[in-house]
Image (cartoon, grey):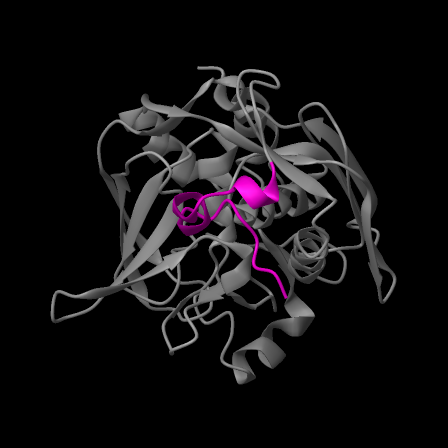
Amino acid sequence: MKGFIWARQTTLASEVSLTGTGVHSGAPVSIVLYPADGDQGLRFLLSNDDGEGTEIAADQRWVTGVTLCTVLGDGNGASVATVEHLLAALRGLGVDNALIEIDSSEVPIMDGSSASFVEAIDEVGLVELDCPRRFLKVLKPIIVEEGGAYGELSPHNGFRLDVEIEFDTPLIGQQRIEIDINPGSFRRELSRARTFGFMKDVERLWAAGLALGASLDNTVAIGEDRIINREGLRYTDEFVRHKALDAVGDLALAGAPILGAYRSRRGGHRLNSLVLKAMFADPEAWILVEAPRAAREVRHADVSHRLAAANFAAERS
């Protein structure tokens, strides 16, 4: 499998189910990943007891929250939180189209990484569809700076991440990773990196109704002078690798694989979202291209209603 350089769109070969717990809600969650037709993109289906459901596209236009996780909402009260790890697995492995049915308002945290989602996707495999793959090609640098954080999307022939973090503790300090994202590198270098938190913040988060499902089974817990988890870290720089994993998931909300390089300094979900919104706000900053290389460029005026519904076009303000 060559992932993003496949000339045609992909979907799952068959459905696959997972169960777990919401890291913030603490509630049990079941999800089913279904194959989807071409040009449908990645979509969530929030099921309810009466057999009906609400669809929310995995698109930056529907981001309603970026505190500690990324939340998508339909504007009418329906929402799904902590979408980034699952979307990272789908985008990281090159899945273009899938319907994600969920029976709760939060994607299960699993072990705090994308590993369980990657294993589930690999178990069923992918199939090619009779639709050309479309990429979102970055045409010029887009820069966002806020509160000491810096994010930039710039032109690149591929999808590259350069992520740097800095925390005032010797257990993390300053860490940086530069990586070209493809299915192989995502599996090896990012997919197993877990979310992390500081023990000193636990009571504050609980009081705010957050992190109710967090445990040492799904979070790297950082104490004053040591990592609390008995097994330690999976990578010596697991913290920055998880931030890079989050960036893959948040940038999946572009609606198509990105041809570009993303630099992030001291960022997180909010910065990732702001950079995407800034890019889509500038019609000269991006273009849609079909695979193979430069087969046809689809400029904004040519984007059809069908593509817009499939999350490949940006909302204009």
Give the position of the C terminus as an image quadrant: bottom right
> Is residue 313 magenta-colored?
yes
Residue lying at the far front of the rendered structure: 301
Question: In the rendering, at what x and y percent does residue 109 appear?
Answer: 43, 54
* Front one among 207 and 57: 57
* Front one among 123 and 216: 123
Give the position of the N terminus as an image quadrant: top left
* Front one among 240 and 16: 16
Residue at the image position 22 percent from the left and 64 percent from the top: 53
Residue at the image position 30 percent from the left and 26 percent from the top: 123
Residue lying at the far left of the rendered structure: 50
> Is residue 93 magenta-colored?
no
Can residue 166 be spotted in the picture? no
Compared to 187, does 242 lie above or below? Answer: below
Question: In the rendering, at what x and y percent does residue 95 appear?
Answer: 42, 32
Compared to 53, does 208 lie above or below? Answer: below
Can residue 196 be spotted in the picture? yes
Which quadrant holds residue 271?
bottom right
Which quadrant holds residue 150?
bottom right
Question: In the rendering, at what x and y percent does residue 20 appear?
Answer: 32, 54
Residue lying at the far right of the rendered structure: 148
The reply, left or right, for residue 309 in relation to residue 256 is left
Range of residues picked out in magenta = 299-317
Compared to 21, does 265 lie above or below? Answer: above
Question: In the rendering, at what x and y percent does residue 34 appear?
Answer: 25, 41
Residue at the image position 56 percent from the left and 18 percent from the top: 295
Tally the marks. 0
